[in-house]
Image (cartoon, coloured by chain):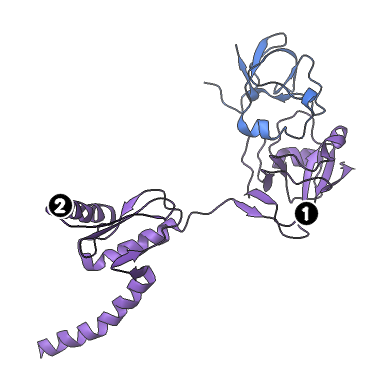
Chain colours: A blue, B purple
Amino acid sequence: MMKKDDLCPFKVGQNVIYMPSQRGKDLLVMSSENQKLIPGELYEIDQVLDDLYVVPKGYSHPGGGLYWTEFKSC
Amino acid sequence: MTTILRLFLFLLLTPVFGIVAQAAGTVQDSFRVVDVGFRTQSIVLQTIEAENCNYDSSGALLQQRKSQDGESADEDRLSELNILRSTGSAWPLFSFLAEFFATNKGATALSTYRKTTAGETFQHYGYKQQAANFQGGLRPGGFATTADGLTGVKARSGLSLPHATPPNAVYTVTPQAGTVVRVNPITKAEFGQPGGLPEFQFPNGTGAGTVSGPRTLP
């Protein structure tokens, strides 16, 4: 079983589903709609930063990638 | 001599028990009425002269019933059994003490919500590219903290923020007095960050004109 402190298990080019935690969603309420991902949607990974943060293709949030635990493999 | 001593003890203890009983609740029309506050379970209190008082989680008096037949008497006996099971009190005389304990146990539930006071300020660590989104104040569910003077990296760390790039700006939030806020004194560790700073969430937002900034972070 993966732990939250583990490194990101996903690879660039892999498809993942955005499944945010409640707090993860709450922390994004000040973001513009076009900077938000849609929960339950499938995204292709464009980059993995610092082996921890996932940047989906087309993601334009100024914070860059999101922590990998907000995604699930499909 | 023994009889006199017993009488003396009785006279001494009776007013003491009376005071404690008054602290435990008021007695109205043979019912002991106690507000159990945030107690989450329905409890059946002492049967007083074959009358039941049943209270629910909100503390409201659910039921007042006078026993009028044999079946009710059985139910009354059942209620006494419930008391003994829930309070551990074997003597009806001391049941009010158990009731007092239960009352105070319920009252220890604390709310994490409060209202802001006049002039209270908070800081929202975010991104200067999002400045336009703050014109209407913090949106419902928006977060802020009382920790000022943080760098972006320290804000990401202490507030357990989920993004790769640390905040590059801070906004000052000055809500109207009476704005509802949920208080979390210690942000939990999450997203690979240790947390530890206080965080405040505004379930209804803060309204237009309550946010100033941004100031660029080092």
Q: Is the residue A1 above or below the residue B103 in the image? A: above
Which callout, 1 or 2, points at the residue further toward the start of the chain?
2
Mark 2 — residue?
B74
Q: Quadrant of residue B61?
A: bottom left
Where is residue B27? Give x, y as percent. Answer: 33, 70
Nearest the camera: A3 or B116?
A: B116
Residue at position x 65%, y 14% in the image: A16
Q: Is residue B191 visible?
A: no
- Residue drawn at 25 percent across, 55 percent down: B83
Which of the two marks, 1 or 2, is nearer to us in this view?
2
Residues at discs 1 and 2 both on one chain: yes
Mark 2 Cα-neighbour bin, 10 Å: few <14, some 14–19, many ≥20:
few
What number is the disc on residue B218? none
Q: Residue at (42%, 52%) from the top-left corner?
A: B39
Quadrant position of residue A24: top right
Provide residue B134's location: percent of width, then percent of height. 82, 39
State which quarter of the image contains the N terminus of chain B. Answer: bottom left
Q: Is residue A54 left or right of residue B127?
A: left
Name the kind of residue labelled 2 in the image.
Asp
> Label 1: which residue?
B121
| Viewport quadrant of the C terminus of chain B | top right
